Image (cartoon, rainbow, N blue to C red):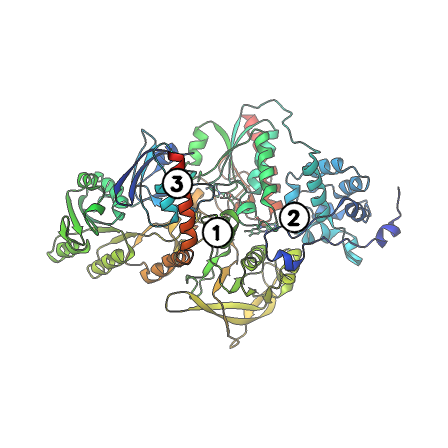
């Protein structure tokens, strides 16, 4: 079973994991993800590969505690093992010399932007990265992003760090001031990706969004991850997760991602109960 | 004891005992209960021991049916098991899931005037008895060949090839994308029809033969075929199934509450969503469920849904019941359990509430015209016959397509129509020497037994291939 070689808290409820999975590390490319299962009764959830290192055979995962599974993952510590990890999955990002590429990362979308920024920079692009979060504490991977970018702009909703406002604002200013933008990559919450797509659409700037629909197998077998892109339905786990943001039906996607969230909500008290059992069991084990 | 043919023909077919529908729709316990020894003998006595047994011709792996039935009558279950296992390494599974009524039993001479010998039920009896008492043991009787063979996918094709190759002395590694081996046998076919314990036993007997399982490896992404060939594997057998679910492309198919049968069944079977929240994976099943399709997958999805407690479950099928490709027994069981069949009906659109959840299904009536290329009569819509049914859950089970992941990641593999891998039917070898394929990915019947049969043929030609170099 894959072992956690390093785990630390990056921000409140946001954790850094370095996990030993040599085959995945050997093949991982920017834009790809893994699917993991924490324990034998666990759910399969997708997580972006934030970094990978062939030498040490490790990949980096950034995990925000939002659901039952990510909370259980957060209970694990350095040295613990993760039951199953499958990957690398998905079609890698298109890495070419485009010119000036603006990368926008919202919240823990920053983790997903990072390997793409690195690869695009290595392909001789001029990289402008705009990363943002609600507040200062939630800005992650600042140093890594700075190293991967020619220009890094930091935005917070409350102005506690960097500029106050949304990540889309600096992009808007760039475009309106006539600065050349050859390509935009946006990864973050759906409303943010949708807003970016709407901003760039009239200018015809190719814009890529990385989608995060519900997934089960991650191999193309279940169709749970289907998204409407242009006239066709695509499976995000094999055809994506990156798609032309101007073609994505964000309304449908946001309804679909809600499907099992509604479900979790109705069962929250039962889930909560179980998590608390697990937490207290772990407390005992850890003493 | 000798019985005359006349006496044999006086015995009527013994029905398969089944759990009471009232009880079984509230649990996932196996529905068909199997024969006891006495019933099995009585049933086996019905076989007329034909000089030219047509039943054997109807069996995709040519089990010597009269011979094994003779041994059942004689009480030599171990011998019966050995006869079956000569050509079928997963008889407990085939006895439960084969469409016998279109294979061996259809050809049985008794079927002409009355009911055929219950060959499937007897195969199951022998195999279960064998498992229970450990009568036959698979073993490796040959010296290790020193050759490594990789098997991609652990469905019936992969498992059969792995077992056969291991018994031939090769060192076999199975690469499986999911976290559990078995393919459709674990993620698709439900517990109440094929207990997972049986699949686990088959896998563990392969482990005893020295087969290695490498789970969580998606060939084409985690490792490529060329890497395997460069890493000392002398041959590769591809058995990744045809696991991509098809949709109809009608309006509303991406609404919440609409899913593929694969997703629905995977959540319940593989991920054990029926035990949520003890297991973490949820499955949504509302009050009024429509399952689209008439195959085994549709029956499995409908009966699985029923066990999650809705008020109403429909099967919506565009042809008539007679054309349904599902096993007869599944259709009967589904009806006994209270599933309503809307035949000659096809959905044309799904309608939703403001939050994107399906609330209604618009259907159109169909009628049958001339037979199409599949030999079944073609359904054509009846103009103006549209009607609506309120539903909050739709499960689409209209068939599967091939996944092109491996083909894209591997040079030199030729594909036929619809993405099926092109293979030499004699050897199961693909267009690339050393790479073989079988099961659903190679087209054909899309049955467990056909997949197994191809797995066995492939194993034999892989054996020849690796020994020649
Ligand atoms: C719900 C359902 C019910 C059915 N009922 C019946 C029945 O009653 N009787 C019958 O005869 N047939 C039935 N079938 C059909 C039958 O199950 C299939 O024909 C059979 O399983 C095909 O076997 P296979 O070995 O080719 O592939 P599969 O069983 O599909 O197994 C393929 C395996 O390969 C793995 N895999 C795929 N790609 C990769 C990759 N790139 N790398 C590694 N692993 C990979 C998959 O995860 C899977 O585990 C049913 C099918 C379904 C879906
Ligand atoms: S997650 Fe199942 S097909 Fe994409």
- Tell me if B14 is positioned left or right of B162 in this view: right
Q: Secondary structure at mark 3?
A: strand
- Tell me if B204 is positioned left or right of A130 in this view: right
**What's the chain of the residue with tag 1?**
B
**Residue B276: assigned label:** 1
Of badges 3 and 1, the one in the foreground is 1
Q: A151 above or below B336?
A: above
Q: What is the distance, in whole Å, between disc 3 and disc 1 at their CAs?
A: 26 Å
Q: Identify the residue position indicated by label 2 in the image.
A: B96
Q: Are marks 1 and 2 on the same chain?
A: yes
**What's the chain of the residue with tag 2?**
B
Q: Secondary structure at mark 2?
A: helix
**What's the chain of the residue with tag 3?**
A
Q: Which residue is rendered at x = 63% and y = 27% of the image?
A: B140
**Does any atom of ligand 1 lie closer than 8 Å to the CB of label 2?**
yes
Q: What is the distance, in whole Å, between disc 1 and disc 2 at their CAs?
A: 28 Å
Can residue B427 be seen by looking at this rendering? no
**Residue A87: assigned label:** 3
Badge 1 density bin: few <14, some 14–19, many ≥20, Cα 10 Å: some
| Mark with earlier residue (1, 2) | 2
Q: B325 above or below B440?
A: below
């Amino acid at each position: 079973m894959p072992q956690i070689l390093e785990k630390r808290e990056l921000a409140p409820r946001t954790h850094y994991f370095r996990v030993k999975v040599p085959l995945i590390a050997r093949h991982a490319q920017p834009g790809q993800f893994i699917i993991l299962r924490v324990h034998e009764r666990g759910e399969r959830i997708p997580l972006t590969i934030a970094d990978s290192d062939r030498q040490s055979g490790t990949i980096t995962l950034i995990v925000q505690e939002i659901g039952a599974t990510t909370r259980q993952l957060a209970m694990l510590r350095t040295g613990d093992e993760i039951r199953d990890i499958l990957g690398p999955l998905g079609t890698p990002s298109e890495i070419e010399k485009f010119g000036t590429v603006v990368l926008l990362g919202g919240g823990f979308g920053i983790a997903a932007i990072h390997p793409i920024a690195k690869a695009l920079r290595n392909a001789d692009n001029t990289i402008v990265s705009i990363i943002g979060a609600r507040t200062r504490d939630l800005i992650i991977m600042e140093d890594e992003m700075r190293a991967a970018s020619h220009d890094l702009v930091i935005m917070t909703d409350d102005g506690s760090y960097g500029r106050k406002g949304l990540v889309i604002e600096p992009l808007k200013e760039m475009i309106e001031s006539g600065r050349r933008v050859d390509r935009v990559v946006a990864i973050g919450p759906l409303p943010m990706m949708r807003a970016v797509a709407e901003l760039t659409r009239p200018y015809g700037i190719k814009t890529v969004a990385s989608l995060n629909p519900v997934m089960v197998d991650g191999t193309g077998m279940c169709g749970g991850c289907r998204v409407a892109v242009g006239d066709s339905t695509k499976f995000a786990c094999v055809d994506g997760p990156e798609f032309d943001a101007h073609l994505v039906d964000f309304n449908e996607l946001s309804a679909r991602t809600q499907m099992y969230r509604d479900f979790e909500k109705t069962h929250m008290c039962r889930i909560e109960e179980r998590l608390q059992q697990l937490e207290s069991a772990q407390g005992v084990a850890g003493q | 004891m000798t019985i005359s043919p006349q006496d044999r023909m006086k015995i009527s077919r013994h029905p398969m005992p089944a759990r009471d529908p009232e009880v079984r729709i509230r649990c996932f316990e196996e529905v068909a209960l199997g024969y006891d020894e006495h019933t099995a003998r009585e049933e086996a006595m019905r076989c007329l021991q034909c000089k030219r047994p047509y039943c054997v011709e109807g069996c995709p792996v040519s089990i010597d049916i009269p011979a094994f039935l003779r041994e059942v009558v004689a009480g030599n279950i171990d011998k019966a098991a050995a006869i079956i296992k000569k050509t079928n390494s997963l008889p407990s599974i085939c006895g439960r899931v084969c469409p016998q009524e279109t294979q061996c039993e259809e050809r049985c001479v008794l079927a002409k005037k009355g009911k055929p010998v219950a060959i499937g039920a007897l195969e199951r009896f022998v195999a279960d008895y064998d498992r229970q008492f450990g009568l036959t043991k698979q073993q490796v009787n040959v010296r290790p060949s020193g050759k490594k063979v990789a098997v991609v996918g652990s469905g019936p094709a992969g498992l059969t090839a792995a077992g056969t190759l291991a018994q031939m002395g090769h060192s076999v590694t199975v690469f499986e994308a999911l976290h559990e081996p078995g393919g459709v046998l674990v993620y698709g076919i439900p517990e109440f029809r094929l207990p997972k314990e049986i699949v686990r036993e088959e896998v563990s007997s392969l482990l005893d033969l020295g087969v290695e399982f490498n789970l969580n490896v998606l060939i084409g992404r985690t490792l490529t075929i060329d890497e395997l060939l460069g890493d000392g594997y002398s041959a590769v057998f591809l058995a990744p199934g045809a696991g991509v679910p098809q949709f109809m492309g009608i309006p509303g198919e991406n609404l919440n509450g609409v899913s593929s049968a694969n997703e629905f069944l995977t959540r319940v079977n593989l991920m054990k969503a029926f035990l949520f929240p003890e297991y973490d994976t949820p499955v949504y099943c509302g009050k009024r469920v429509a399952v689209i399709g008439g195959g085994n997958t549709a029956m499995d999805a409908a009966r699985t849904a029923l066990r999650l407690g809705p008020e109403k479950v429909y099967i919506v099928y565009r042809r008539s019941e007679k054309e349904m490709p599902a096993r007869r027994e599944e259709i009967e069981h589904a009806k006994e359990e209270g599933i309503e069949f809307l035949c000659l009906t096809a959905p044309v659109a799904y309608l939703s509430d403001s939050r994107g959840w399906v609330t209604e299904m618009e259907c159109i009536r169909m009628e049958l015209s001339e037979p199409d290329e599949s030999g079944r009569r073609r359904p054509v819509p009846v103009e103006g016959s549209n009607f609506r049914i309120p539903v909050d859950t739709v499960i689409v089970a209209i068939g599967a397509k091939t996944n092109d992941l491996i083909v894209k990641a591997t040079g030199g593999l030729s594909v036929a129509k619809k993405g099926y891998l092109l293979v030499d039917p004699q050897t199961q070898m693909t267009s690339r020497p050393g790479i073989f394929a079988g099961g659903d990915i190679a087209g054909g019947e899309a049955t467990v037994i056909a997949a197994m049969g191809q797995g066995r043929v492939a194993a034999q030609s892989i054996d020849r291939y690796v020994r020649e170099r």
